[in-house]
Image (cartoon, rainbow, N blue to C red):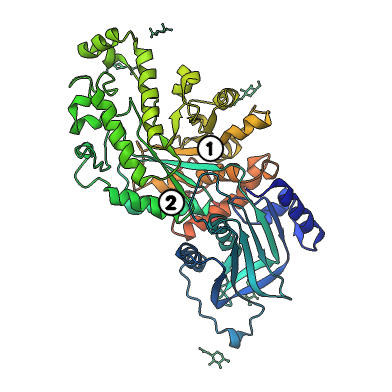
Amino acid sequence: MASEASLVAMVVALALSNALLVTSESEYNKVKIWPMPASVSYGHSHLYLSNDFELSTNYDSGLLKDAFNRMLAVIRLGHIIEANFSALHLSPLLRGLHIVISSSNHQLQYTIDESYKLTVPSPENPGYAHLEAQTVYGALHGLQTFSQLCHFNFTSRVLEVHMSPWTIIDQPRFSYRGLLIDTSRHYLPLPVVKKVIDSMSYAKLNVLHWHIVDSQSFPLEIPSYPKLWDGAYSPSERYTVADAAEVVSYAQQRGINVLAEIDVPGHARSWGTGYPSLWPSKDCQQPLDVSKEFTFKVIDGILSDFSKIFKFKFVHLGGDEVNTSCWTITPHISKWLREHGMNESQAYQYFVLRAQNVALSHGYEIVNWEETFNDFGNKLSRKTVVHNWLGGGVARQVVASGLRCIVSNQDKWYLHYLDTTLQEFYANEPLTNITNLKQQKLVIGGEVCMWGEFVDGSDIEQTIWPRAAAAAERLWTPYDKLAKNPREVTGRLAHFRCLLNQRGVAAAPLAGQGRSAPEGPGSCYEQ
Ligand SMILES: *[C@@H]1O[C@H](CO)[C@@H](O)[C@H](O)[C@H]1NC(C)=O
Ligand SMILES: *[C@@H]1O[C@H](CO)[C@@H](O)[C@H](O)[C@H]1NC(C)=O
Ligand SMILES: *[C@@H]1O[C@H](CO)[C@@H](O)[C@H](O)[C@H]1NC(C)=O
Ligand SMILES: *[C@@H]1O[C@H](CO)[C@@H](O)[C@H](O)[C@H]1NC(C)=O
Ligand SMILES: *[C@@H]1O[C@H](CO)[C@@H](O)[C@H](O)[C@H]1NC(C)=O
């Protein structure tokens, strides 16, 4: 992250230049950028993008070139650029984007610097727009912002940047800005997953939480235990190891980490299709059998295979909604419990902590759902990030205990609740009631969750968007720049939702419930 001091210095320098520094909500509404950057100033002139608008950079990597070419495709929006510049006497011309990146390290580590500075020149001095960033991933965010400044002009038939000169200095508020997808309740084909990743990058979300398996199906190939994916819904609703690696690489090229999850010991019935001895019994199939060494060998095998594919610092081990009655009513397990002097809640703790140790042994830090914290928070590894979901107020307790937290309270950030409004998504503040600065830093961010019971490839995009975008701004934009009344951002968010539509993302209208259809004829911007 850019230091606070340097950001302040840059903002002061900006304020002294002649461009208008955006400070009020009415000015924000003219600036159609989503999520709103930390600092923006703009002018009143048009620039035209040259037909051979080019990338010039000190950074030699395919990753940046590919991202630049994708950005060009996205700003063309399928239009044919057919102007004859010399005949139309179009000027001033923007010839390209000059990108300077300080660090040559292009590993997408957690808490990597995502800041950038973007300037688009004034018409008196055109030539190149400039983008500076510490890391290539900051530059990717800068490209996304630049893409939102460009428009196709139907008179001149060229691409333009309005309101130049621009100076944008930006960095995220939280380092973890997630979206959960669930490929167990419904299988999501790879092109659907990739489209979701593309759309995340438009809103500057940076973690795809992949809830891969659950009770209903086990779609992923696990080489160490090759019968696990017998638990897939059908032979074709599966991911190979190479597929998973491709998802990780595709996401990484867009600045997005993949957080893989296996949810244990509950939510795991599908594991037993291939290995029935993981079930307590044929008639009582979850949670996983706590009494067998084999259970932990399988977890070890899965996490060993994971560590070769999922390179993110964290793995998610679930741990939520564990109903232990199969343990107490299954004779061999209740005998084991007695022999080990444990009741069922102690066995739940034993299971979670042992799974944590397996994850640690593979080099991961751990994310667990909040029940683990609520039941035995002081026993969890100090490398645990507690994932809130049940409601508000948990983050405050988690960080007070010194652990880190991700906020996903279901009343505000669960996307399958279609009656949760855009305004509620926007207004959900992860630091509510947390005033201590050190504790605030332990809230690493938040995540909106797209559970899969009621979505598949046919409707996932319109259920995610536009409400996930409201949360994305909450997680990106500095607190003092966020709208106090979410209704103030409606116009700008409508604009972003139409931009998503133009880019081929099926984002639903703002009016009505989540995922609603247009209510009648009309402009995208009015719905
Ligand atoms: C563009 O316009 C110039 C000046 O009118 C003309 O010389 C040139 O042939 C035109 N180019 C194309 C590709 O039409
Ligand atoms: C499009 O370009 C024409 C011709 O250069 C210009 O007069 C007009 O203002 C532009 N339209 C918009 C919406 O900026
Ligand atoms: C817990 O599991 C048992 C055995 O499968 C089942 O009978 C019971 O209804 C479950 N309890 C809850 C609260 O889901
Ligand atoms: C399990 O044992 C612990 C420690 O004795 C006790 O605090 C807890 O209430 C017991 N839980 C149940 C469900 O019996
Ligand atoms: C924050 O604190 C207020 C006042 O104590 C309380 O009413 C509210 O429920 C709390 N909110 C959360 C999310 O903890």
Q: Amino acid at mark 1?
A: Gly
**Relative to the observer, which residue lies in front, 236 or 83?**
236
Instruction: From the top left corner, tell me how far across and down residue 146 is, in percent.
Output: 59, 62
Instruction: Give the residue at x 67% y 71%.
Output: 46
Q: Nearer the viewer, residue 185 or 56?
A: 56
Q: Quadrant of residue 435?
A: top right
Q: Nearer the viewer, residue 30 or 278?
A: 278
Kind of residue sitting beneath label 2:
Ile
Q: Residue visible at 46% across and 41% down?
A: 313
Q: CA distance from mark 1 to mark 2?
A: 17 Å
Q: Mark on residue 446?
A: 1
Element type at mark 1: strand
Q: Are marks 1 and 2 in contact (CB under 8 Å)?
A: no
Residue 401 vs residue 234: left or right?
A: right
Q: Residue at position x 45%, y 47% from top?
A: 257
Q: Position of residue 246 (x, y in %)?
A: 35, 53
Is there any visible trace of residue 9 in the rendered image? yes
Q: Is residue 122 above or below residue 496?
A: below
Which x, y percent locates residue 81?
51, 76
**Crowdedness of circle 2 by 10 Å Cα count: few (<14), some, many (20+)?**
many
Would the CB of label 1 be found within 8 Å of ligand 5?
A: no
Regarding mark 2 in the picture, which secondary structure is present there? Answer: helix
- Determine which residue is flagged by label 2: 197
- Count how many numbered circles sit on residues in the image: 2
Residue 344, position in %: x, y? 34, 12
Q: Quadrant of ligand 1?
A: bottom right
- Please tell me whether residue 395 is drawn above or below residue 489 in the rendered image: above
Residue 430 seen anywhere in this rendered image of the structure: no
Judge by depth and name the residue closer to the eye, 119 or 92: 119
